[in-house]
């Protein structure tokens, strides 16, 4: 599930004429940085939700063959990430699936992070597995982190006034049955993470490499410089 429907308000004025997933970093649109990684990991189908400048995203993805793109159209109503998943469930199926934001990606590392995430998925003890990165070593992190992680890789939500060592990279694996019984159209995804954490069923897998979050116009330059330093 690729989230590409958001308004990109923090990226204005860039997103006054362009959807955030098509903002280029290193000469490549953000959405393609991640879709290329999914293709390399062997993911065959990506469901992409669209709303803001939807036609631009649909046109951009029209000729892509790997992964195969299925559009989940939210032009009529923006559903937030939870509602977007609920709408797309008929396409996503009954097995756990990847989640992916389109305002970040990673470089470096020696292992395929998506393959590693799938390898560590353990549905008997997990409802959600998130790819997390060290807050201090990531680019574009302008908040005090998201999670702490215990020695067994369980994640706990950052407490108020606490600085947490790990950030959610926007990529994870989640069970579709978590959305059963949610009849509302518009709802957030984050509460599902927090509920799983309270049950001890939210786990983390640490990113191999370094993470680039591109959430503001200023962050584009930061990411470009980081790529240049990495020789990308």
Image: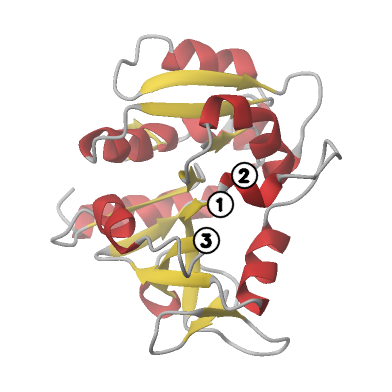
Above or below residue 194? Residue 186 is: above
Please state the horizontal and vertical placement of residue 13, each as a whole percent of the image.
66, 38
In the image: residue 25, left or right of residue 22: left
Numbered badge on residue 53: none
SS label for mark 3: strand
How did the renderer colour the structure? secondary structure
Above or below residue 197? Residue 43 is: above
Residue 6 visible at all: no
1 or 3: tag closer to the N-terminus: 3
In the picture of the structure, the residue carrying the numbered disc 1 is 215
Towards the viewer: 229 or 181 = 181
Q: How far apart are the alpha carbons under marks 3 and 2?
A: 28 Å
2 or 1: tag closer to the N-terminus: 2
SS label for mark 2: helix
Please, which residue is most extreme toward the right here? 184
**Label 1 vs label 3, nearer the camera:** 3
Characterize the local packing of mark 1: few (<14), some (14-19) or many (20 or more) Cα atoms within 10 angstroms.
Answer: many
SS label for mark 1: loop
């Amino acid at each position: 599930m690729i989230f590409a429907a958001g308004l990109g308000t923090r990226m204005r004025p860039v997103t006054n004429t362009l959807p955030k997933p098509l903002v280029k970093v290193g000469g490549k649109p953000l959405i393609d940085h991640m879709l290329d990684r999914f293709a390399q990991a062997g993911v065959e189908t990506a469901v992409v939700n669209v709303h803001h400048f939807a036609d631009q995203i649909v046109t951009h993805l029209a000729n892509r063959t790997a992964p195969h793109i299925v559009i989940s159209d939210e032009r009529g109503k923006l559903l937030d990430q939870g509602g977007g998943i609920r709408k797309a469930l008929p396409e996503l199926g009954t097995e756990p699936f990847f989640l992916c934001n389109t305002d970040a990606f990673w470089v470096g590392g020696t292992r395929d992070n998506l393959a590693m995430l799938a390898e560590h998925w353990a549905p008997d003890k997990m409802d959600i597995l998130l790819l997390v990165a060290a807050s201090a070593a990531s680019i574009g992190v302008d908040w005090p982190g998201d999670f702490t992680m215990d020695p067994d890789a369980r994640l706990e939500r950052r407490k108020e006034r606490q600085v947490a060592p790990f950030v959610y990279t926007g990529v994870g694996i989640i069970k579709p049955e978590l959305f059963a019984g949610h009849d509302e159209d518009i709802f957030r995804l984050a509460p599902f993470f927090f509920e799983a954490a309270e049950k001890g069923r939210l786990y983390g897998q640490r990113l191999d490499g370094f993470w680039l979050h591109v959430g503001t116009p200023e962050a584009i330059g930061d990411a470009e410089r980081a790529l240049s330093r990495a020789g990308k």
